[in-house]
Image (cartoon, rainbow, N blue to C red):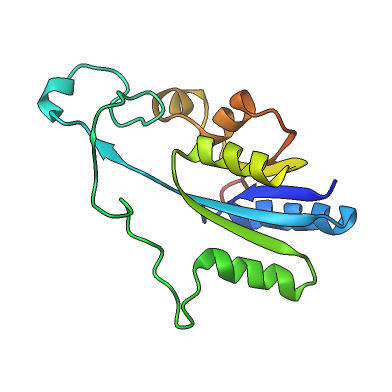
Amino acid sequence: MKRILVPVDFSPAMEGVLARAGEIARGCEAQLHLVHVREIAAVPVFPAATIGYPGIGMPEMGMAGGLPVGCPGYLPADPPNEKGKSRLELLRDEFARSGLPTVVHESEGTVVEEILKTAAEVSADLIVMGSHGHGAVYNLLVGSVTEGVLKAGQRPVLLVPAPAPGK
């Protein structure tokens, strides 16, 4: 195993995911690839015409037509810190200080598609990602990036469960 991909969403569960991915990468002498995707949000062209249609507000289930929200870049960028580095670059630097070769990938688009695209581009041997454990109803209504990567991907995926509340 030479390349491990870790989708980063900066949620509280990411600390455990990054720790586990770092342990595996060190043990295998693998390169760590951190990917952060800023999802492009779209609003329907005629919002009133979408009432009663399922999938509105769920990009993976919604209709294709829409106008991008904001321009250019669609969503505000991560504000850089005082040295002009993004949060992802700061994570990379932290891993590099511990002697772990780390590469960052930042992109915009549909999260699942961009994760899988990056995994293919870097020939990832493993994808390590978190499972937030929201449950079946939440995933049905909102969707799940983890589920999308598991279903559409063709690479091994290690799921790291989110810590239980209060632990």
At x 52% / y 36%, what residue is drawn? 112
Q: Is residue 57 something one can see in this rendering?
A: yes
Name the spot of residue 153 as percent of width and height, x first: 64, 29
161 lies left or right of 49: right
Q: Nearer the viewer, residue 90 or 160?
A: 90
Rendered-image quadrant of the C terminus = bottom right
Name the spot of residue 89 as percent of width and height, x first: 57, 68
104 lies left or right of 44: right
At x 60% / y 44%, what residue is drawn? 118
At x 65% / y 49%, what residue is drawn? 6
At x 45% / y 83%, what residue is drawn? 82
Name the spot of residue 92 as percent of width and height, x first: 64, 67
Q: Is residue 167 something one can see in this rendering?
A: no
Q: Nearer the viewer, residue 112 or 55?
A: 112
The residue sitting at the bottom extreme is: 82
Residue 65 in the image: above or below residue 105: above
| Residue 141, quarter of the rendered image | top left
